[in-house]
Image: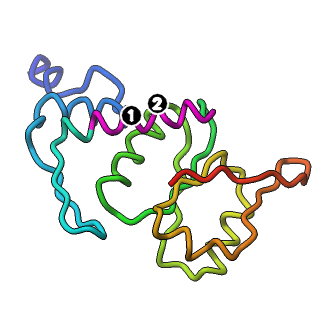
Amino acid sequence: MEELIKRCMMDIPLNISTMLERAEMFFAKKQVVSRTKNGIAHHTYREIGKRTRRLASALKTIGVGTGDQVRTFVRNHHRHLEAYFAIPGMGAVLHTINIRLSLNHIAYIINHVEDKVLWIEEDLVSSIEKYNLTQYDKVGKKKPVKVAA
């Protein structure tokens, strides 16, 4: 009985990176289907893994590191899934903004957080560009927001 219990237990920590690695290993050809503004998108878990690593690499290139906060303002589709894996997987903190909030609430959230990057869908930029998107550091000094579309 003890052996059976040991075989049922995990022997490694469960984190977001191991979840994606497992999906790539055991379900590489299974499709992730999502609806985008251009229609239905189909990607395998293998493709999601590759795209996730590219996103993490791009974020590192623009200076995102361990402990940095990344805000996302995107619809719920494969790109958001990739961010969901990439950002915490690289040790950064993922903050999501609900796109269904009012524009005033969205602007308030963006202007009052300490995120290093705002990752936003290209067609959503126009909905918030009239707002002064600035952030304040811990001593109250304004700093520009890096926007990645």
Left of 53 or right of it: where is 87? right
Instruction: Tell me the crowding category of disc 2: few under 14, some 14 to 19, or many 20 or more residues within 10 angstroms, Cα based.
Output: some
User: Which numbered dot is residue 57?
Assistant: 2
Q: Residue at x 19, y 40 (%)?
A: 45
In the picture, residue 27 is in which quadrant? top left
Q: Amino acid at mark 1?
A: Arg
Say if 11 sits above or below 31 in the image.
above
Residue 34 covered by magenta stretch:
no
Q: Write down the residue under mark 1.
A: 54
- Name the residue located 81 percent from the left edge and 51 percent from the top edge: 143
Secondary structure at badge 2 equals helix
Which residue appears at 29% of the width and 54% of the height?
Answer: 78
Is 143 in front, or is 27?
Answer: 143
> Is the stretch drawn in magenta largely helix, strand or loop?
helix
Horizontal arrangement in the rendering, residue 20 relative to residue 102 (left or right): left
The reply to whether callout 2 and callout 1 are in contact (CB within 8 Å) is yes
Q: Is 31 left, or right, of 132 in this rendering?
A: left
Which stretch is magenta? 49-63
In which image quadrant can residue 63 be found? top right
Q: Residue furthest top?
A: 3
The span from disc 2 to disc 1 (Cα, nearest Å) is 5 Å
Q: Which mark is residue 84?
A: none
Q: Percent from the top left, x then y, of residue 76? A: 35, 63
In this view, 70 is above or below 99: above
